[in-house]
Amino acid sequence: MKRSGWRLAPYRLALVLAVLTLALPTITAMAATGDAARGEQLFTGSQAMSNGGAPCIGCHALAGLGSAGTASYGPDLSALYADYEAEGVAAVLESLAFPSMEAIYANRPLTDSERLDLTAFFAQSAEQQAPAAKSLAGLILLGVIIVFAIVGITGLRRFKGARRPLVEQANKQRGVKA
Ligand code: HEC
């Protein structure tokens, strides 16, 4: 019964892939459990950074913050999340090692929770800017369907390829017996 195992294997693989694809966004969402509201307060300075770092809004513009968010000493951060994704933003916030910011933050680093909160805030503001990004879920689903289709077709072909000679052989044997 080895052969039936072979036939099932691609489907099992597809199932595992499908589960992983569906679970991954949930896992990443769970990993970044920052508080976006608190992130906004840290960004705008309505809540002070624990280690005394300056609020980002002093130098950076961000869409959605009205005229308060139009500082232009540093680059506009509206597209930050879209450009860097969660890991990239986390890495940037880890060191803030840009020439103009290093002097401020080298001795006043953001805490882990401040980084998470700011990341959540950047994610939220990116979402508000581009609600169309929600179609990502649709894209993932499409990917899963395509994987199933490919596996289904190749699996079927393999099944036929193995089966035909066996049927012919069986018929031949039957013919010999009769
Ligand atoms: C004193 C002004 C100042 C403050 C305060 C400041 N930045 Fe900056 N930031 C800059 C400047 C200027 C640059 C451009 C690179 C450079 O000249 O160092 C920059 C660059 C960046 C970049 C890179 C942008 C890109 O497109 O590559 C990020 C991300 C960033 N800052 C995030 C922050 C965050 C988050 C905060 C708040 C925790 C913050 N900055 C606070 C001045 C500042």
Image (spheres, grey):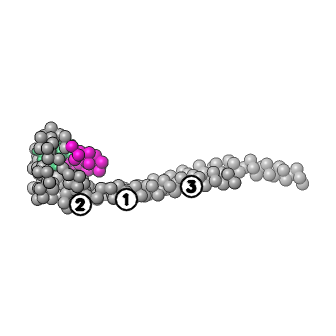
Q: What amino acid is found at the position of numbered circle 1 in the picture?
A: Thr
Q: Secondary structure at mark 3?
A: helix
Depth order, front residue of 117/50? 50
Q: Secondary structure at mark 1?
A: helix
The residue carrying mark 2 is 35
Residue located at (89% from left, 52% from top): 177
82 within the magenta span: yes
Q: In the rendered view of the protein, which quadrant contains the C terminus?
A: bottom right
Depth order, front residue of 176/20? 20
> Which label sits on residue 61?
none
Distance from Cα at disc 3 to Cα at disc 2: 40 Å
Residue 8 placement: quadrant = bottom right
Residue located at (66% from left, 54% from top): 4
Q: Residue furthest top?
A: 99
> Which label sits on residue 26?
1
Q: Are marks 3 and 1 in contact (CB under 8 Å)?
A: no
Q: Residue furthest right?
A: 178
Q: Which residues are magenta?
A: 77-95
Image x and y of residue 103, in percent = 12, 40
Total marks shown come to 3
Task: For residue 26, say whether it is visible.
Answer: yes
| Other residues around mark 2 within 10 Å, as few (<14) / some (14–19) / many (≥20) | some
Q: Are marks 3 and 2 in contact (CB under 8 Å)?
A: no
Q: In the rendered view of the protein, which quadrant contains the N terminus?
A: bottom right
Q: What amino acid is found at the position of numbered circle 2 in the picture?
A: Asp
Image x and y of residue 36, in percent = 22, 59
The residue carrying mark 3 is 11
Depth order, front residue of 128/60? 60
In the displayed structure, does residue 160 sit left or right of residue 27? right
